Image: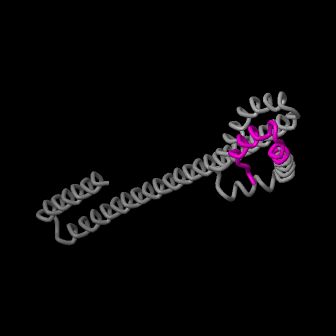
Amino acid sequence: MKTKLTAVALLLAATMMVACEEKKADTGAKALDKAKEATKEAANKTGEAVKEGADKATEAAKDAGEAAADKAKEATDAAKGKVAELTDAAKSSMNDYLSNLGKLTETLAGAKDPISGGKAAMDAKPLTEKVSGALAALDKLSPELKASLKETFKDQLSGVTTKYKEQVDRLAKDSTFGKALSDMLKNVKLFE
């Protein structure tokens, strides 16, 4: 744009010089007519240059707006993906918790005498660690997501938790082998 304005200024100066030279030879009226014509021509070229610059600025603004819209859509899509990922991870943690608590409950139900109680204690140890690990993952979730999971899985959660508590209570009352198991199970926290 600067180059065009410089060219217009040079054209105007040349026109004036020509007009001055012709003034010597021509009459004043002819020189004035030529100067008017040169000024009109310079004004037209300046107007065209300004219009061209405005058109380019409009085009650049439009392109910037489209690029911003594309970036916003990409960010929204990425956020939706993260939410879906988080939801899938939360469901997976809940399924792990329910599965391992169910296995632990079955293991405890098998403790009927000192021999089966000893075996149950050995089998229960890694299951309590898995339940605690799944619970730790669930504890990291937002309160809203926890509430949503509790609502979604309420029937399974209620059933497995009730059965687990029944086994812990039964073992706590057993004087022969229940003490060792109930002490270990006191540290298991539940997702309630």
Quadrant in the picture for residue 19: bottom left
Of residue 26 and residue 181, the one placed in the foreground of this image is: 181
Q: Decide if residue 186 is on the left or right side of residue 17.
A: right
Q: Return the x and y of residue 111 as percentages of the image width and height.
A: 85, 34
Residue 43 appears in which quarter of the rendering? bottom left
Q: 115 or 88, which is in the foreground?
A: 115
Q: Position of residue 113 (x, y in %)?
A: 87, 32
Magenta highlight on residue 178 = yes
Q: Nearer the viewer, residue 149 or 16?
A: 149
Q: What stretch is highlighted in magenta?
A: 168-192
- Name the one closer to the observer, 5 or 13: 5
- Residue drawn at x 41%, y 56% is 52
Residue 1 placed where, x, y %? 32, 54
User: Is 1 drawn above or below residue 188 in the view shown?
Assistant: below
The tally of labels here is 0
Asked if the magenta segment contains residue 19, the reply would be: no
Residue 88 as seen in the image, left or right of residue 173: left
The residue at the point 17 percent across, 71 percent down is 28
Residue 37 horizontal side relative to residue 91, left or right: left
